[in-house]
Each structure stands twice: as structure tokens, then as C-alpha cells.
Image (cartoon, rainbow, N blue to C red):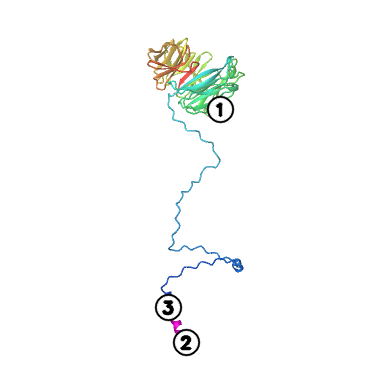
Amino acid sequence: MGTHRRVAVLMAALSIAAAACSSAAGTASPAPPTAPPAATGSASASLAPATPTPAPTVGPTQPKAPTPTPVPPTATPTHSPTPHPTPAPTLPPVVHGQYLLYLTSVVDTPDSFIPQAWLVKPDGTGARKIAQGFSLGPYSPPPVDLDAIWSHDGSMIHITRWPNCAAHISNLPVGAATEIPVVTMTDKDWLFRWSPTGGKIAYWHYSGADHVCEQNSIDNIHDLAWMNAAGGTKTTVKTNVTYRLSAWLPDGSGLVAVNDYDAWYRVSLSNGSAVSLLVTATRLDVSPDGTKVAFLSGGMLYVKPLFGGASKNLGAATDFAWRPNSAALAVSGGTLRLVNATTGIGTVVFAFTAKSPSWSPDGSKLAFIKSSGGGVFVVAANGGPVKTIPGTTRATQVSWQP
């Protein structure tokens, strides 16, 4: 074959091959990318800078990352970041009449004893000591003492101690285990009386040389004063008074007080003025409704209107307590009797002499201490079985939770 013929044949073959490649490019899928060659260890491969692989761009057909669940924003505190004391524990609601409070003592040494205050349920269960004083010697008067009384609403107990003769007053809410300090008084303050609303404490203050713990009546000069029950400023109402505080009137309008000659007065806490009740008695209590007084005089119990009116003799008595409805009294004198305040008619509920009688809030039962042999007892006001409270033979005073 000649030279020109070979060239022509070659050109034709090339044309056919180009056409075939053009046709295949329009229909075939692109070949997968070839993996980069492995490093060969050559100098040129090791020194060449590595080309960073760009992060893949999320295309419209690629799945998106899941949307995170929104978290509620945290509330920004509005109070000061200064730490605050831990709040007091929430106490259960007050159940009126749930407990008896009694004062007693335990022997410390053969010549001394320790005063204590206890709570117990009227059925004799749940007894627990709530306060303790200091060891008292055999001498009179004692250098220290312990007092515990119910608040008027029955929600707490007012506790007073006299370490070093200065009164320390605290409150113990019912159901709590720890006392709440209220105030420390001086060694010349005495006879603290809480108002019916619990907002004030009336007391008398020695202004002379005598001290409370001496209790020797050498100096009877004292002042009538009061303070807020939560502590605070002490206000002197009247100086050099001649009477001693006994109790608040039920409406909180004033107090009743007695002088050294057993004469009784109604006293104003605003100016200390005293109005005579025209009664001479060793003890006097105002009825819960504030309309009458009962008082002991010459070994007999009498009842009369708060102001004016004639006195009615209810018979021999050594102790007494008004029923909550003011219609009758528990009267001790040889026996414990329930006596009508108007008619004077009485019925025996306990055949022995008793002291410190105290009524349940609903007036259906009585707690008291047996004068001979001691011990706290509970009985229904209409008579019936008598319940003995165990472990109370040394009790000196008992009172029912209001």
C-alpha cells in the first residue's frame, strides 16, 4: 500500500473513534473518583505540603441535623444573693385541748432538785419534757426557778428561767423541739403577764434596792411596766405603785391587781390608774366573759359582778377555776365539785381534795392534782371514771391547752 493510502486509512479510523467517544460521553455515568495514591516514601512526596480537604457543603438534597429540643429558660432571681437563714420548719396545725402542761421536779442531790416542765396527752400518752431549770438548793428562797404557761390561743408555751436572777423568756411552739428566745430581763423584773392577744407583756419592776431573787419583801417599791411580747422597748406606765399584777382582763382593756392588804383593783395599762373592785381576797379571777369575778376570802369562795352588785357565797374552798362558758366553776374544798355560778348548786366529781383544777377548752373535762399523794388526774365534768396520768406524782401545777 502506498504512503497516501495509509494516511487516508489512518485518518478515517481516527474519525470513527472520535465519533464513538462523543456518543459514549452523552450517555455513560461518570466514573467514581480515583482514590489518592498512597505515599511512596519518596522525598518529593514527603516534602509536598498537604492540601486540606474542604468540609462538605450541605446540599439541598442532603438530610439536615435534627433540631434540638428547646430548654425552658432559668428564672433570674430577683432577690439579693446574700444568703438567708434556713426557714423554720412548718409546724402542724394547733389542736386545741390536745395536751396537758404540768410543772414538776426531779431530785438532783439529797439537798436539791431540778424543776421541769412536761407535756402529756389527757389519756396519759405522749409524755415529753419540754423545759428544765437549774438545780435548786434546800434554802429559801431559791436562787433560780422555772415557769411555763400556755399562750392564750394555745399555740405555744411561754417559758421563763432565772439564771443569775435575770429572767430569760422564750417561746416553744406546740410541736416544735427548740425554744425561740424572746428577751432577757433584768434581775429586778417580775410577774410577767401576757395579754389575751399575745401582743404585750405587763410586768412590775423593782426600782429600789431589793432584787427579785432575794424575794424578802424588804423593799416593795416597784413600777408598772409593759413591753411588746416579741421583745423591744420597755415602757414604764407608773412609778412607785402599791399593787402587784394578777391577770389581764379577758378583753385586754386592763389588768386586775392586788395590794399588800389583799385589796383588789382594776388597773389601766395606759396610765396606771387603779379603780377599786371593793373586794378583799387572797385570790381573785375574772370570768372568761369578763362580767364576774370569783374570789377566796376567809376560806370561802364568792362570786360577784366585776363592778358593783352583791357577792354570792359558794361555800368552803381552797382552789377554783372558771368553766370556759363562765356559767360554773370547779371548786376544791374537801372534794372537787362542779358549782353553778348563779345558783350555787354543786355536784361532786372527785371525792378527794384537789388543787390546780383546769378545764378542757370545751368544758367537758377537768385536769387536777390530788392534794394528798400527788399525781395528775383527769375526769369528766359530769363525773365518771378518773384517769391517772402516770409519772406525775411530783407535779405541782397542771393546765389544759386552751
The residue at the point 54 percent across, 21 percent down is 146
* Amino acid at circle 1: Val
- Magenta span covers which residues? 1-19
Q: Is residue 44 left or right of residue 198?
A: right
Residue where numbered disc 2 is placed: 6
Q: Secondary structure at mark 2?
A: helix
Q: Position of residue 56 (x, y in %)?
A: 49, 63
* Amino acid at circle 2: Arg
Q: CA distance from mark 3 to mark 2?
A: 22 Å
Instruction: Tell me, yes or no, whether the two marked residues, 2 and 1, touch with CB atoms within 8 Å.
Output: no
* Amino acid at circle 3: Ala
Near mark 2 (Cα within 10 A), the count class, few <14, some 14-19 or many ≥20, is few
Q: Quadrant of residue 290?
A: top left
Residue where numbered disc 3 is placed: 20
Counting residues from the start of the chain, the first of labels 1 and 3 encountered is 3
Q: Secondary structure at mark 3?
A: helix
Residue where numbered disc 1 is placed: 183
Q: Secondary structure at mark 1?
A: strand
- Viewer-proximal residue, 389 or 338? 389
Q: CA distance from mark 1 to mark 3?
A: 113 Å
Near mark 1 (Cα within 10 A), the count class, few <14, some 14-19 or many ≥20, is some
Counting residues from the start of the chain, the first of labels 2 and 1 encountered is 2
